[in-house]
Amino acid sequence: MYLPDLNKDKLLERLKFSMTKKEVLQLAKSFSNSGVGFEEIISLTLHKDQPISFHSAWVLENMFITSPEALDYYLPTLIDNLPKAKNHSVQRHLTKLISLGVQRVVKRKTSKVIDREFWQTNLEPLEEICFKWLVDEKSKPAIKANCMDVLFHLSLRQKWIAQELPYIIENQMEMGTPALRAKGKKVLMQLKEKI
């Protein structure tokens, strides 16, 4: 499906239709090679048409996985867009990307400039939305798991999160799916190791 000869409009049109993982990978490569920028795909994750927003988020995730340095640069934009995402599938992809981005900052895989700018950013909206979705009964387990990861990574610098997070995770584990309980157990162990 790699379509280097298709123009940008036809590539964007392709986002309206269902696709397999292989097609998503090929579409991500086609977007990169056709000059469609990260900004454009990020904006499409908030599109009112749910298939377009979902497929854009899925393609975006795969674009960033192959270009983690770009994720460093666009992390603030993803954080700004997160509260605006209404589609659960988009929320899942964006929280995963933000988790990966924050992890890169925490593990110092980013430049010193990115690191300094990230910690000077107002992270309160990110913290709020992650806590909100973590306790929201309507949030999907994958979103909750990604929010646990984001909050864990933030807790390495924000001590108050490290104090609050275990209680919330334990509560979620009581009502959660087996996968969510496993994730909660893992994050709780990481928090204990940190302390």
Image: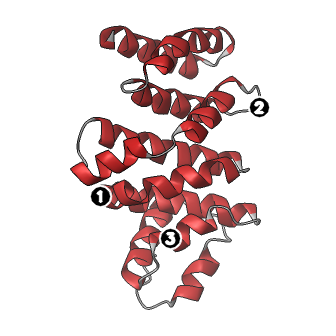
| Disc number for residue 69 | 1
Q: Of the residues under marks 2 and 3, which one precedes in the sequence?
A: 3
Q: Nearer the viewer, mark 2 or mark 1?
A: 1
194 w.r.t. 146: above or below: above
Q: Nearer the viewer, mark 2 or mark 3?
A: 3
- Label 3 and label 1: CA atoms lie apart by 15 Å
- Which residue sits furthest front? 120
- Residue 170 is drawn in which quadrant? top right
For image coordinates 53% across by 16% down, the residue present is 165
* Residue 32, horizontal then vertical, whole percent: 39, 75
Would you say the residues marked 2 and 1 are in contact, meaning their CB atoms lie under 8 Å apart?
Answer: no
Residue 87 appears in the picture as rendered: yes
Residue 101 appears in the picture as rendered: no
* Residue 42, horizontal then vertical, whole percent: 55, 64
Q: Is residue 123 left or right of 72 when viewed as pictured? A: right
- Residue type of the residue flagged with mark 2: Lys
* Residue 87, horizontal then vertical, whole percent: 71, 50
Q: Of the residues under marks 2 and 1, which one precedes in the sequence?
A: 1
Q: What is the quadrant of the C terminus in the image?
A: top left
- Label 2 and label 3: CA atoms lie apart by 29 Å
Label 2 residue SS: loop
